[in-house]
Image (cartoon, rainbow, N blue to C red):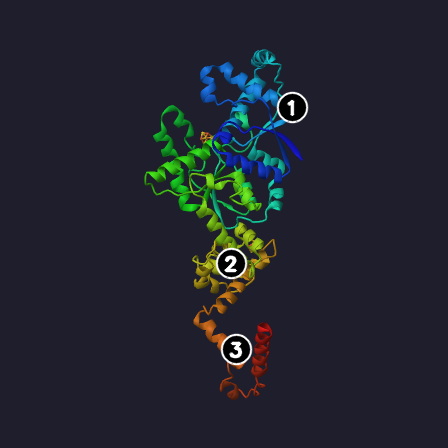
Amino acid sequence: MSHYAMFLGCTIPARFPFMEKSIRMVLSELDIHTIDLEGTTCCPTKSIANVIGNKTWYVTGARNLALAEAAGLNILTPCNGCFSSFKAVITDLNMDLNLRDSVNRELGRVGLEYTGKVKVKHIVQVLHDDVTAAEIKKRVVKPLTGMKVAVHYGCHMVRPSSAIHFDDPNRPSKFDVLVEAIGAQSVDYSTKMMCCGNDLNSVGESDAAIAMSREKLLETQQIADGMTTACPACFNQYDSKQYLMQKSGEHIDMPIIYLTELLGLSFGFSPEEMGMKMHRVDTTQFLEKWEQRTAYLEEVRNNFDLDMLDRCYQCGACMDDCPVVKVNPDFNPNRVIGDILAGKMEEVLNGPDVWRCVSCYTCFELCPQRFGMNKVFENLKQLAYQMNIMPEGVDGGIKMLLETGRLGEPTAMRKKLKLPDLPKSGSKDLRILLKLDEESESQ
Ligand code: SF4
Ligand code: SF4
Ligand code: SF4
């Protein structure tokens, strides 16, 4: 079990207690023990504390860090702002020893010292680097398979890279990995690394702040079922401010879900116990869609190996070698698999692609996982047959096989060539056998 000093910051306890609830539930489920330090203050937020003076900013930050050092713990924070503030203070105090000495002289007045030993980790960092996606996967009892989620990192989780060194500051991936570990699909989108605009609120530029949020919300609502963030300030921007946009008649409806709420759902925690009803923007549509997809995927699971289907969809390696794809660019086996996972089974069964696979086994022979998309198409063809959706040729062939036991009757040409009469077809026995199969199935 890992131990951390929990640093929630000011916003979570003051405004979003439901966030704290899911954070504590998920960390405890993952055997991360957190201790609430006595006597901490605001991290501090640079835009406020630094206005009072540089020293105030350093002393306030160093005091919180020194409290964790005194307790012999590293800090875990679920807030981008706190994370970034601490990282900046640490970087400066570790690089400028004169500054550190002068800060420590102040801290000495309250019996504290900052030595530089304490590490500060963002909750995403702890979950990704320490717990690992593989371990998280093991706790998932209700995956979010088929749900499309837009990840919002928030600038201060990864920037400035000179202080943070946690993930790529321009194309980060660790948060996405966590989202995919619980079965959801993390969608790519062009405004992904755009700032939420929250800081503009405190300088009286709330219209500009809302405009920045709106841009991302408008894009993500086209491509995702929900957006996730791991920062209370970003959450406020996208949830509370979106609510104001909705109230003023804007057609924006994007559920915002804090990272640990998303994980909690997949661990089997109910939205009620995590307090998700306290969000300003209703999350019901996300939850209902998820329930429907879960039920749908249970159905699909009866006919397909879902995990394999998912891996095959991510892979797509053999697609360019499919001979049908080479001559018919409209045929896209990978899209068919994606559509099955996305809940579009009826569309797939009614579409032409089901019958385009010629069972050549090229994909099977090339597949490093010994899967092969041909299996998917075989199952789809059987399902389509059960629903009586078939091209004429297949329908005629099946009827003929069941009636005559053959796919063609011997013609007069055989006589001309003096070929011997063919033995009688075993169609009668075959029909009996097929009927017996049906009888035993219905018993
Ligand atoms: S996206 Fe906004 S609130 Fe979030 S970390 Fe960046 S500036 Fe702060
Ligand atoms: S088996 Fe079907 S999907 Fe696979 S390569 Fe052949 S035609 Fe394409
Ligand atoms: S059949 Fe195999 S190689 Fe082809 S996409 Fe699926 S997993 Fe990848």
For the residue with label 1, is its CB less than 8 Å from the closest atom of ligand 1?
no
Label 3 to label 1, Cα distance in Å?
Answer: 79 Å
For the residue with label 2, is its CB less than 8 Å from the closest atom of ligand 2?
yes
Residue tagged by mark 3? 401
x then y, percent, for residue 189: 44, 41
Kind of residue indicated by mark 3 = Leu
Residue 83 visible in the displayed image: yes
Frontmost of labels 3 and 2 is: 3
Q: Neighbour class for label 2 at 10 Å: few (<14), some, many (≥20)?
A: many
> Which secondary structure lies at badge 1?
loop
Kind of residue indicated by mark 1 = Ala
Label 3 to label 2, Cα distance in Å?
Answer: 29 Å
Given the current orientation, which residue lies at the most extreme left position?
249
x then y, percent, for residue 58: 53, 17
* In the image, residue 54 above or below residue 323: above
| Residue at 48% from the left image edge and 32% from the top image edge | 232
Residue nearer the viewer, 151 or 404: 151
Mark seen at residue 71 = 1
Mark seen at residue 322 = 2
Kind of residue indicated by mark 2 = Cys
> Which secondary structure lies at badge 3?
helix
Frontmost of labels 3 and 1 is: 1
x then y, percent, for residue 88: 53, 22
Locate the N terminus by quadrant: top right
Label 1 to label 2, Cα distance in Å?
Answer: 61 Å
> Which secondary structure lies at badge 2?
loop
Residue nearer the viewer, 403 or 442: 442
